[in-house]
């Protein structure tokens, strides 16, 4: 079955035109003849038309413009260079310079405190998320990355996740025995087990094929990922459960960051902060565009759980909160709730 192209994005086209014109001008800029630009290789695993992809492109365009091509942020989307399983190692070895992994990925490399972002039904809206990521709690998490030789440069949103499957998911009983692709997160895996499902950790880039082949029967995603990765073609049912948050942290290595001139570090950080603010502004719109496209396509049945059904899902997965509290300490969980309610 054919389906319409992803919704047009005028801002992305504008960014690409800006980047191309600045790059062309930089080739003829005084003083740059024969001088190679400083390369900053930015790798990520999702489509260019997702919030993450658009943030990376915005950063690329801003840096090209402000340095007249002296610094070139090279963006590699769709796991073209590295995927979920090897991108952190690539950053450590210097094969790439910048990543924006989902917050779920930090737990498995020694930072379980980041797993709070995977807790189901924790955030009601993005304002609550930002009170954590933009406050002392979130800043302290980023600062702690130095233990692994990493520099945390900022957070940004994708949005809230929804469940899809080869069958309708209305009640808790509908999840029983369902093989669900998950990120390598203990919290997300525990959530699926609490629902009676069977979590199967897989790289994001392998998810669509695994769904098509029946290796897994369902998954969870923000709508922009679900649409741009073509998962709607292999998932006949989508439930708008809005059960969890998906966000990212932009990181680099201390080795790369320390080699930059202070002025270049400041320029990159400022440009990134502006790109993140832009990404957070458009994240909601990207989800709405994807939902509109899914409804127009019509090949996936979209279900909207009732308030009672969502409350029952939340009740069943509530023990996952206590389980994480035992692992990272109840004081941290209490501090998190204070930050959300501030």
Image: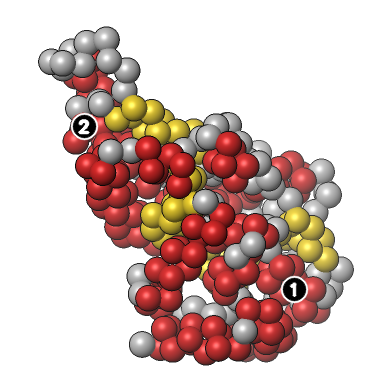
Q: Hey, which quadrant is residue 31 in on the image?
A: top left
Q: Hey, which quadrant is residue 187 in on the image?
A: bottom right
Reply above or below: 198 against 256: below
Question: How far is the residue under mark 2 from the one under mark 1?
Answer: 47 Å
Q: Few, some or many C-alpha atoms within 10 Å of disc 2 (few <14, some 14-19, many ≥20)?
A: some
Q: Residue at x 49, y 57 (%)?
A: 146
Q: Nearer the viewer, residue 156 or 179?
A: 156
Q: Nearer the viewer, residue 227 or 261?
A: 261
Q: Nearer the viewer, residue 93 or 313?
A: 93
Q: Residue at x 27, y 15 (%)?
A: 35
- The residue indicated by pointer 1 is 190
- The residue indicated by pointer 2 is 67
Q: Is residue 87 visible?
A: no
In the figure, is residue 272 to the left or right of 242? Answer: left
Mark toward the viewer: 2 or 1: 2
In the figure, is residue 19 to the left or right of 315? Answer: left
Q: Secondary structure at mark 2?
A: helix
Quarter that holds the N terminus: top right
Q: Hey, which quadrant is residue 315 in on the image?
A: bottom right
Q: Secondary structure at mark 1?
A: helix
Where's residue 83, x and y in %? 63, 41
Q: Nearer the viewer, residue 101 or 91?
A: 91
- Residue at the farthest left position: 30
Q: Residue at x 48, y 45 (%)?
A: 253
Q: Few, some or many C-alpha atoms within 10 Å of disc 1 (few <14, some 14-19, many ≥20)?
A: many
């Amino acid at each position: 079955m054919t389906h319409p192209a992803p919704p047009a994005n005028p801002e992305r086209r504008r960014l690409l035109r800006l980047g191309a014109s600045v790059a062309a001008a930089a080739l003829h800029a005084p003083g740059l003849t024969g001088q190679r630009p400083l390369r900053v290789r930015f790798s990520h695993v999702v489509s260019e038309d997702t919030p993450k992809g658009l943030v990376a492109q915005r950063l690329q365009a801003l840096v090209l413009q402000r340095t007249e091509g002296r610094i070139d942020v090279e963006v590699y989307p769709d796991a073209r260079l590295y995927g979920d399983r090897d991108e952190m190692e690539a950053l450590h070895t210097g094969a790439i310079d910048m990543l924006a992994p989902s917050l779920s990925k930090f737990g498995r490399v020694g930072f379980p405190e980041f797993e709070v972002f995977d807790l189901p039904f924790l955030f009601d809206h993005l304002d609550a998320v930002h009170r954590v990521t933009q406050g002392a709690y979130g800043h302290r998490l980023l600062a702690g990355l130095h233990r692994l030789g990493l520099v945390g440069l900022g957070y940004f949103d994708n949005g809230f996740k929804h469940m899809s499957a080869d069958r309708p998911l209305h009640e808790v009983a509908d999840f029983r025995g369902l093989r669900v692709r998950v990120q390598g997160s203990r919290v997300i895996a525990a959530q699926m087990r609490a629902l009676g499902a069977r979590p199967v950790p897989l790289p994001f880039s392998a998810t669509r094929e695994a769904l098509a082949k029946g290796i897994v029967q369902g998954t969870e995603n923000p709508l922009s990922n679900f649409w741009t990765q073509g998962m709607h073609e292999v998932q006949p049912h989508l439930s708008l459960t809005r059960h969890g948050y998906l966000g990212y942290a932009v990181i680099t290595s201390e080795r790369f960051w320390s080699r930059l001139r202070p002025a270049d570090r400041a320029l990159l950080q400022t440009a990134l902060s502006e790109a993140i603010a832009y990404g957070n502004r458009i994240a909601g719109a990207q989800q709405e565009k994807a939902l509109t496209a899914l409804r127009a396509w019509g090949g996936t049945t979209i279900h909207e759980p009732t308030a009672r059904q969502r409350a029952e899902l939340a009740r069943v997965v509530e023990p996952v909160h206590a389980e994480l509290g035992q692992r990272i300490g109840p004081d941290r969980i209490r501090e998190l709730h204070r930050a959300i309610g501030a």
